[in-house]
Image: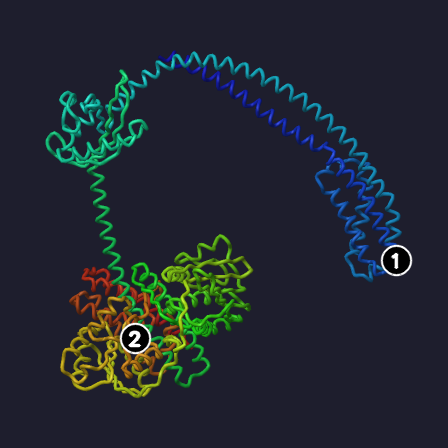
Amino acid sequence: MTGTTEQLGKPWRRRGATVFALVCCVGMIAFMAWVLLRELEDVSTANSDNLQWSLAQADVEFLRFELAMQRALDDPLQVDQVRRRFDIFYSRVDTIENGLVFRELRRDPTYDEPRAVVRTFLQDTIPLIDGDDATLIAALPDLSERALAVSDEVRRFSLGGLAAFAEVSDARREDLVRTLILLAIVLAALLGGLVLVALAMFRLSQLAIRRSDEVRRTSARMRTIVETSQDAIIVANRRGEILEFNPAAEKIFEVSRADALGQRVAELVLPERSRTKARDTYFRFMNDGARDSGEALHLEVTAKTQGGREFPAEVAVNHAEDASGGQVHVIYMRDISRRRAAENDLTEARDRALAGERAKAEFLAVMSHEMRTPLNGLLGSMQLMRDQSVSDRQQELLNRMEFSGRLLLSLVNDVLDLAKYEAGRIDIVRKPFSVPRLLDGVIETTAPLATKNGNALDWRWEGTPVDGAVGDPRRLRQVLLNLVGNAVKFTRAGTVEIEAEVIGASDPQLEFRVIDSGVGIAHEDLDRIFRDFETLDSSYARQAGGTGLGLGIARRFAMLMGGEIGVESEPGEGSLFWLRLPFAPADLSEGTPSDAETAPSPAIRPLDILLVEDNEINRLVAREFLEADGHTVTEAVNGRAGVEWANARRFDAILMDVSMPVMDGPEAARTIRSGDGPSKTAPIIAVTAHALPEEIAAFRQAGMPHCVSKPLDRNALQKTLAEVAGGAPVAADAAVPLADKPSDAPLIEAENLERFRDGSAVALLDRSVAEINWDIDRIAEGTLAPADLQQVVHKCAGTCGVFGFSALRRALAAVETDLKRGAPVAPERLHALSVLWDKTRDTLEDWRVAQP
């Protein structure tokens, strides 16, 4: 056997050597052909003419240079011609010296000596040429004499180059002849190689005869493979009688090969209810032409074992010819019970994932409330402080605090807008609105940032202006604010302009173009900027910051409104963002709908208001807002106390927090409405950060048709109270702006603490720190009942959020979420809150020490 293998291997090795030699010859011929082409190109007439022309032209350009100097001596105004002719002559010489085509000429002394003289002349003349006109005009006489002295060397330089080139050309022609001779030798060798290949092919024909024996041995190996296959392989004749039954089939169907041979396949391996379907599928497959195409039939059936156990099976059926030319059917069957189990597991996992998505939506609703609670204290206190007399330093701190609060609020809204879109809970409204008024509002909102960055900001119509359109002005305004805000942030001392135009005749669209002269965007980043959490790495981007969500949300809103959004930009040339929406004109002759976001806050009569809020700081902010507008405020610290006050006296309006201990807002509202107290019919305004539609509907069902969002905005509160006082109906699409879960934050945020440095604010901070310390100790003990624990965690989290204890606030919020879901909270997590509070308190003390 070993000797046979060696005999078979030798012809293959010889053939391999022959082929390798041929490949080498072909490669050598290709290489020599390339060399030959290069040499032919080098000696071609075009290159020769170009070389000779360059050498001769140098002499001509030098004569023109001398002539220009003579003219400049007569007319100093011709001094620019002197520079021009010098530059041309210098370019000719530089080409000769540095060009690859003159490389061999530079090695010839006859050519190189005058070249050195000419180069020296050029180097000495450059300072005069590059100097001012007066210096050059004064030096012209001397320069003309020097040029005259060098003219002979220029001519020698040109003639010497031509002579040297003639010698080089002769040498190249000789090299070309040698290359042709060598190429002929290689071609002869190639011819001999082809003869050897013909001999090798003859030997291969002999080898093919021996290979037929190997094919027979291969068939035996294939039989072994069939017998060891994990899949059941059954061969049957046209009547369905089993001819072959491999060992895997014996194992799967629990029947021996001897017993299976001669039986019908369907009766042996399929339960009776599956036979009709399998037979119909097979005949339909055969009638469709698969019999002659060679395709296999694939289907899934329910199979059975000899013992009666049923299982899912995957079947592949094809036909072949036997030794006598008759047709047989080859059937492959595989038990897919495990795969079906895995698919069921995946389905169950999908259901769990969907449940998780619902849980996430609930979590976001809770976090919206909790995020806006500290923002209420932050932004509300700043608005109240602006009503007081403050120093420049205090005004600076107020500006910094308000910027941070508004930034946090925008991030909260962005992330929750994304979550709400993914949950399919954003509804687009269609109502008439004024396009110019909307654009004026966008300009007014972004003007302060544009002024800060030194930008000019405006909008204009292209083509025929329109006034009214039908659409969703709130979503459109949000998209335009995002585009204009980005343009303003990434432009410094430039221009930002909005163009509006109605395009298309049969299918009109309203197109907005935001054009800036800012940093621009690289081509490879144009698609990436519309992805979520994508920010570009530029100095302006780092200064401007952001989560990278704005454009992703803008793209989603554009799609919801039936439009599209895109960008055109070049780095350093600015950007053009465009937004196209379906256009339907609206008649606003009877008055433009009010814009709740830009309309001034109405003045109303003083009201007697019940404020129901468990957070002391939130009560403080709301009370000062209300009392500053002349209202009378009565406070209640939880829902039950609010019910008692409402049953005791008549109030013009009730501000009801949603999430409170003892009794929450919706329950308190239902209790008030179902009772007989004096405030049974008083308007109840829900104060909440919840924003999902079903929650708003739940508030209304509880008797709270109006909602205001946390953190409290003074203008929004005034407008809501004006609606309540005037008996205005509640808009069907009224909703509370979204909030979201907080981003990663440090132990403390110093900007939040700036307002607690002086006077009574310091006492409030000290008292709140003591309360947090007491609450954390109670939480860490782990002895509170779940309901009591949830109340303490909620109260402590709200206080931490107001003072900027971000890390502890986030940990408390996570515990509260689990408690609301009814999930157990491990004692280790509660103890970790105590450790985190110790670190937060130490950082707070360091901040206090660092204060002036």
Instruction: Estimate the x, y position of residue 820 in percent, counting from the top left.
Output: 21, 64
Image coords of residue 477 (percent x, y): 41, 69
Query: Toward the viewer: 748 or 643?
Result: 643
Work out whether 467 lies above or below 169.
below
Residue 642 in picture, x, y percent from top left: 20, 80
- Read off the residue under disc 1: 73
Residue 543 can be seen, yes or no: no
672 sits to left or right of 807:
left
Please tell me whether residue 490 is drawn above or below residue 238 in the rendered image.
below
- Camera-near label (2 vs 1) is 2
- Measure how far apart labels 2 and 1 are at the Cα level: 89 Å
- Depth check: give the residue in front, 467 or 421: 467
Quarter of the image holding residue 271?
Answer: top left
| Circles 2, 1 touching at the beta carbon (< 8 Å) | no
- Sequence-wise first label, 2 or 1: 1
Q: Amino acid at mark 1?
A: Leu
- Amino acid type shown at disc 2: Val
Q: Quadrant of the N terminus?
A: top left
Q: Quadrant of the C terminus?
A: bottom left
Identify which residue is drawn at 43% across, 71% down: 435
Callout 2: few (<14), some (14-19), or many (20+) C-alpha neighbours within 10 Å? Answer: many
Instruction: Provide the residue designation for mark 2.
Output: 708
In this rendering, is residue 581 above or below 322? below
Q: Is residue 586 left or right of residue 654?
A: right
Label 1 packing within 10 angstroms: few (<14), some (14-19), many (20+): some
Instruction: Residue 252: give its label.
Output: none
Residue 102 shows in this picture: yes
The residue lying toward the viewer, choosing from 307 and 633, is 307
